[in-house]
Image: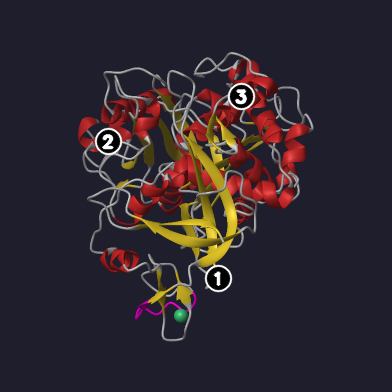
Amino acid sequence: MTPGHASPGRRPVIAGLGLTDVGKFFGRSAAQLAAEAARLAVADAGLELAEVDGLLVSAGVTRGVNLSLHRDLGLTDLALLSEMQAFGATAGAMVAHASMAITSGTAKAVLCVFGDDPLKEGRSASAAYGPRRTPSGWRGLLTSAGISGANPLYALAARRHMQRFGTTTEQLGHIAVAQRKWAAMNPAAQMKDPITLADHEASRWVAEPFRLLDCCLVSNGGAAVLVTSAERAEDLRQPAVPVLGWGQSHPGHLQRHHDDFGLVTGAVRSGRAAMGMAGITVQDVDVVELYDCYTYTVLVSLEDYGFCGKGEGGAFAASGALGPGGTLRLNTGGGQLSGFYLWGMTPLHEAVLQARGQAGERQSPEHEVVLVSGNGGVLDHHATLVLGGAA
Amino acid sequence: MSLGPVSRNDETAAFFDGTARGELLLRTCPSGHWSEPEAACCTTCGVTDLSWSASKGTGRVVSWSAVHGRPRDDGSADRRVIAVVELDEGPWWWTALQDVEQPSEGLRVQVAFTVPAEDSETVPYFVPA
Ligand SMILES: [Zn+2]
């Protein structure tokens, strides 16, 4: 082995995948869901929990998961342990961090775990992501104006795209309809009943130009992946999914003058970095799992990753390219709009299934290259992963 | 639809002193760059010795939305227009927009002030100029 270079055996792979129940159910805390997901991922890999020497933890909106997860899992003498937070980009950032730990030899088997429980018995779903205390300070000023939670902030971004490029609400509707078709083939999806463009148009306004069917679900649940080396994964239970590339971008213009607001996002840089590391171009991508907190997020991400030209996302979405039978296999589990909303774990989970060839009825016949996106804040944080087909 | 109450904290005390006087305060640096009131350093040159300076309170709509409340039993729901306003000094301001139902990009607007509740600070919002 050459000093300073990772040995070939240290190529990072995803070897385990865990997903708890997802959706509207009560009685299990975010921490319990995270621990359950972690154990599922380890069992899925066919590994002993004692062999895990790295743990990365991500809490959702309820902030209910933290470093003490290692105690709940009985993990001792860890070589790597940290909480990570880049909002919707956290899942991708965790896998990147774990991959670097594997490549460098810092750790041999790293769990990346997420858990959240925003849905509480007797409380509306919107309350989970809404204001919780008397508004004060800068955030209070926003709340005072009617700007609380992510809906209005993303709506302002989407409106700008519509103003500049002529994007329409009907074009956004095509994304919602296409993803619902995929969700119908996903046993884990929360919303499986087919919808039409008319249903989209008839759904109630949330924050113009967004209607209810432009917005993601709210879900309780936990998800985890186990990252290890290709060498260690050889005799494990599941086909190993290589992590070929990763990238992040944090533009840093949070609620300040930014001429690209709503028009161009950090996915451009994040995608370029990840695809560059993987040595691929967008033409090589077989399956795309994009963070889809809103239909608009899908649309602008498609443009920024280069699946269509800037400003052409609306026409692309309406062209029939999306959905089962379309030319681009996008958000094949129904995504966060129709599947379930576990932040960046939603696209990552589906990406691993597709890369392994285990997505059942909705499996893409080609799955050599899978692109996964994460997006957090209000287009403030981006993480991209390129996964390879399982060996 | 009226605005909601807001209280001050250490970061916003000077700002709300300004709104009480009918001023929308922004931050300025020694080189004369304008930053949004939240800025901890100049968004143009990065220096930290910022002063408070009053905006003219005029600008244009960069983007807008209307936030809808949950429908009541009779089907009606609150609708509040919000906007990103580019102030003529340069900074952008996320705000409530009143007296216009369907604004358009570029609409000229100006600041107004209200005290939404007895125990609230004075809150800025915008109306067509
Ligand atoms: Zn300056």
User: Between marks 2 and 1, how big is the CA–CA gap?
Assistant: 43 Å
Q: Is residue A197 positioned above or below A155 on the image?
A: above
Q: Is residue B124 visible?
A: yes
* Residue A318 placement (x, y as % from top left): 76, 33
Q: Is residue A9 visible?
A: no
Under 8 Å from ligand 1: the CB of mark 3? no
Tell me, yes or no, whether the highlighted magenta stretch contains residue A174. no
Q: Could you tell me if the residues under marks 3 and 2 are in contact, i.e. CB atoms within 8 Å?
A: no
Of the 4 image quadrants, the one containing the C terminus of chain A is top right
Q: Disc 1 or disc 3, which is closer to the eye? A: 1
Q: Which residue is mark 2?
A: A64
Please rate how many residues cluster around mark 1, counting C-alpha atoms within 10 Å: few if below 14, some from 14 to 19, many from 20. Answer: few
* Residue A166 placement (x, y as % from top left): 74, 46
Residue at far bottom of view = B31
Marked residue chain, label 1 = B
Q: Which residue is mark 3?
A: A357
| Marked residue nearer the N-terminal end (3 or 2) | 2
Number of numbered labels in the structure image: 3
Marked residue chain, label 2 = A
* Residue A322 placement (x, y as % from top left): 72, 30
Q: Residue at x 36, y 53 (%)?
A: A141
Tell me, yes or no, whether the highlighted magenta stretch contains residue B49. yes
Q: Which residue is mark 1?
A: B88
Task: Give the amino acid type for the residue marked by disc 1 in the picture.
Answer: Asp
Q: Main secondary structure of the magenta part?
A: loop
User: Between marks 1 and 3, how big is the CA–CA gap?
Assistant: 55 Å
Which region shows up in magenta? B44-52
